[in-house]
Image (tube, grey):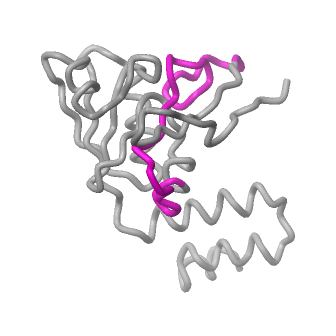
Amino acid sequence: MTVIIKKLYGVAAAVLLLLVAGCADDTVAEAKLAVMAKTQTPVSLEVYKSPTCGCCSKWIDHVDAKGFKAATHHPNDLNLVKQQFGVAPQYQSCHTGVSKEGYIFEGHVPADIMQKFLAEKPKGALGLAVPGMPVGSPGMEMGDRYDDYDVLLLKNDGSSSVYARIRHQS
């Protein structure tokens, strides 16, 4: 029966089945994100990175799977690119993504948090950053090892605040 409903009504019917079945809130939220990623036009993202960085490529795969379409660039001077986009040294990581609206996504920012940010478009925001390279962040997976980390809201005035806290249960 489930297969027939999926074929007749697509992904939206699958989400409805999850809701009716009384799945956990997290499962429903993930299903909603999956529907959004499949039914909306992908969000264009220009990504600047080193040609040899494997974790950057894994992060690009992560965002592409979650409703983004990344175009990759390998500039001669990545630090200059970050400077031109206003990413201060204390917020930097190994790659910089830029949306068509000019929002910056520095480092291993999870795609679902990027989607939330783009839906909200906080006033005075430059973008989001995950400084450094936290273990377990998208693109930095290392088995069952995880670091807790913050996703910072970068503001146009050069300041920042915590936008989201990523905490992993042991």
Look at the picture and state if 2 lies above or below 119. Answer: below
Tell me if 76 is positioned left or right of 109 in this view: left
Look at the picture and state if 139 lies above or below 60. Answer: above
- Report which quarter residue 47 is drawn in: top left
Q: Is residue 36 magenta?
A: no
Look at the picture and state if 124 lies above or below 3. Answer: above
Magenta segment main secondary structure: loop
Please, which residue is most extreme toward the bottom here? Answer: 8
Q: Is residue 137 magenta?
A: yes
Coordinates of residue 167 in the picture (x, y in percent) = 75, 31
Please, which residue is most extreme toward the left here? Answer: 76
Tell me if 159 is positioned left or right of 166 in this view: left
- At a point 65% along the width and 62% down the height, the residue shown is 31
Query: If the image is split into quadrants, where does the N terminus sit?
Result: bottom right
- Report which quarter residue 38 is drawn in: bottom left
- Report which quarter residue 72 is drawn in: top left
131 and 64: which one is in front? 131
Look at the picture and state if 59 lies above or below 133. Answer: below
- At a point 38% along the width and 52% down the height, the residue shown is 68
Coordinates of residue 128 in the picture (x, y in percent) = 48, 39
Tell me if 144 is positioned left or right of 104 in this view: right
- At a point 47% along the width and 57% down the height, the residue shown is 123
Query: If the image is split into quadrants, where does the C terminus sit?
Result: top right
Count of labels in the image: 0
Coordinates of residue 21 in the picture (x, y in percent) = 84, 72
22 and 6: which one is in front? 22
Tell me if 137 is positioned left or right of 102 in this view: right
Coordinates of residue 17 in the picture (x, y in percent) = 73, 75
- At a point 39% along the width and 42% down the height, the residue shown is 156
The residue range painted magenta reads 117-145
150 and 139: which one is in front? 150
